[in-house]
Amino acid sequence: MAEKHTNAIITQIADLESRVAFQDDTIETLNQLVTQQFHQIQQLEHKLKLLGERFQQLQERNDDPSSTNPADEVPPHY
């Protein structure tokens, strides 16, 4: 009877060790994914900031009455 109880405990411990190993692998995979997404978000934020600055420059140029219309400019090869 004690041997059955011992075998059951050993089986439960093995199952728990297996679960922990699987969870550790899952946590590591998720950590890598979160890190990758963090870097992608940083890159996108940087690009968005640059686009915002470029848009602001273009808007300021359009609002400036002294600026010339690009359609009126003579191309450089003329």
Image (spheres, rainbow, N blue to C red):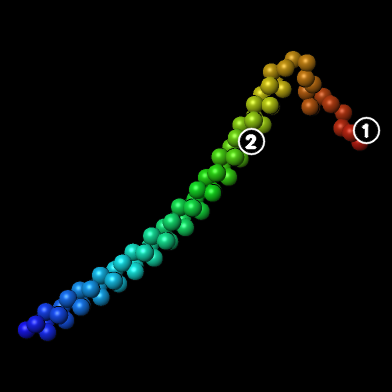
Looking at the picture, which amino acid does disc 2 mark? Leu
Task: Name the residue nearer the viewer: 36 or 14.
Answer: 14
> Residues under labels 1 and 2: Cα distance?
33 Å
In the image, taking residue 68 as reference, residue 41 lies left or right, namely left
Dot 1 crowding, Cα within 10 Å, few <14, some 14–19, many 20+: few
The quarter of the image holding the N terminus is bottom left
Measured from the top left, where is residue 43 in percent x and y?
A: 58, 45
Measured from the top left, where is residue 75 in percent x and y?
A: 87, 32
Identify the residue at image location x=39%, y=65%: 25
* Residue under numbered circle 2: 50
The quarter of the image holding the C terminus is top right
Assign a secondary structure to mark 2.
Answer: helix
* Residue under numbered circle 1: 78
| Picture mark count | 2
Identify the residue at image location x=20%, y=74%: 12
In the image, taking residue 33 as reference, residue 52 lies left or right, namely right
On screen, residue 64 above or below 25 = above
Residue sitting farthest toward the top? 65
Quarter where residue 73 is shown: top right
